[in-house]
Image (cartoon, rainbow, N blue to C red):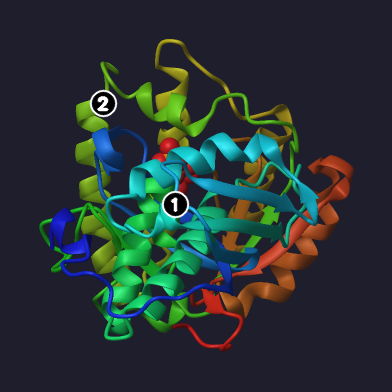
Amino acid sequence: MVEQDFIPKYNYKLTIESGKFTWQSPSNIALVKYWGKKEHQIPKNPSISFTLNTCKTTTTLKFEKKEVPTELFSFDVFLDGKKQDDFKPKIETFFKQIESYLPFLKEYHFVIETSNSFPHSSGIASSASGMSALALCLMSIEKKLNPDITQEYFNKKASFLSRLGSGSACRSIEGDLIFWGIHKEIGGSSNLFGIKYPYQVHNNFKNYQDTILLVDKGEKQVSSTVGHNLMHNHPFAQQRFEQANNNISKLIEVFKTGNLKSFIEIVESEALTLHAMMMTSLPYFMLMKPNTLKIINAIWSFRNQTGLHICFTLDAGANVHVLYPENEIKQVLKFIQNELVAHCQNGHYICDRIGFGAKNLQLNTEY
Ligand code: DP6
């Protein structure tokens, strides 16, 4: 599919005066990281993520036809019931990016009411869950205007639109393992939207656990857009993009065979490479905190002592995602509580696990 396939070809069959839709969309955690992008949110390398279950955004989009059409976008945003004008520029930019794909946007006034299952200042990025929840609400309007849309098109376009809001958001529409970006061994893969990982996945990865240790809840030191831009003219960029492609090839085998040892090696190397890229760019950044390193070292020694399959990954911040298989929950949680929670800010952590994607709360379905 190409961009043009997401532009409605005919005028919508129906009209709608007003209404509201509510979607709940999860966050996701990348195993192979997206870091570096071209124009129009096209990734420099493919990425793959676990969709999460507990960390999510719920968004209600109310819409009402303007009495007099205007050339401006018209909307208000509320977070947890409070007007949030500082979210407006990001949403305005998003609307501009997606306007040609949703030609009805300027016909309505929107009220966007959003809330996150995780605390606002937890250092957990809400852009993936937030942008995908909003994109899904907008797709529900499109479906109302054109009821012939298939579920497959609905999901693809929701992912396509989410990507234009925030790259990683395109991996939050479905679950449980989502692939984004073109890779030669993954049929149907696209730079434009995420797809469900199409090959065999061993039972070892079913209901995989992710306990998120909140090491630093402060504002991000580097915004993702600034971060991605650091990969332009980065001395190691080309090798990094190749490495990501190779890691995907290795993961295809790992998912088939259930080889947890190799899984751990790839996932931890990806996390450290992401941070290595930040440390070796100009300007350079160090987003890990002393407690991030303490946690990583504790995980390594616990793994050596017990032979359990616990590992970590990181996103562009100091928090640590602790990943482990379902059958090791008991021992790993005990270890986390006894040894790792002490390194979390105010002892805060979130127990999450693999999830299956966004939910339409009106219909209580995935469509
Ligand atoms: C480190 O999706 O937040 O989490 O496209 O600029 O919104 P934008 O970036 P964003 O970048 C996520 C980067 C990452 C890795 C990943 O999720 O793959």
Image location (x, y in percent) of residue 304? 59, 54
Looking at the rendering, in which quadrant would you find the C terminus?
bottom left
Quadrant of the image where one finds ligand 1:
top left
Q: Amino acid at mark 2?
A: Ala
* Label of residue 54 in the image: none
Q: Earlier in the sequence, mark 2 or mark 1?
A: 1
Above-or-below relation of 33 to 170: above
Q: Please identify the residue farthest to the front as the structure is shown.
A: 68
Is any part of residue 133 visible from this angle?
A: yes
Image location (x, y in percent) of residue 145? 36, 76
Q: Quadrant of residue 180?
A: bottom left
Q: Quadrant of residue 71?
A: top left
Q: Quadrant of residue 241?
A: top left
Q: Residue at x 25, y 33 (%)?
A: 39
Q: Nearer the viewer, mark 2 or mark 1?
A: 1
Under tag 2, what secondary structure? helix
The answer to which of 273 and 58 lies nearer the viewer is: 58
Q: Amino acid at mark 1?
A: Pro
Under tag 1, what secondary structure? loop
Q: Is residue 319 left or right of residue 32?
A: right
Residue that numbered label 2 is attached to: 237
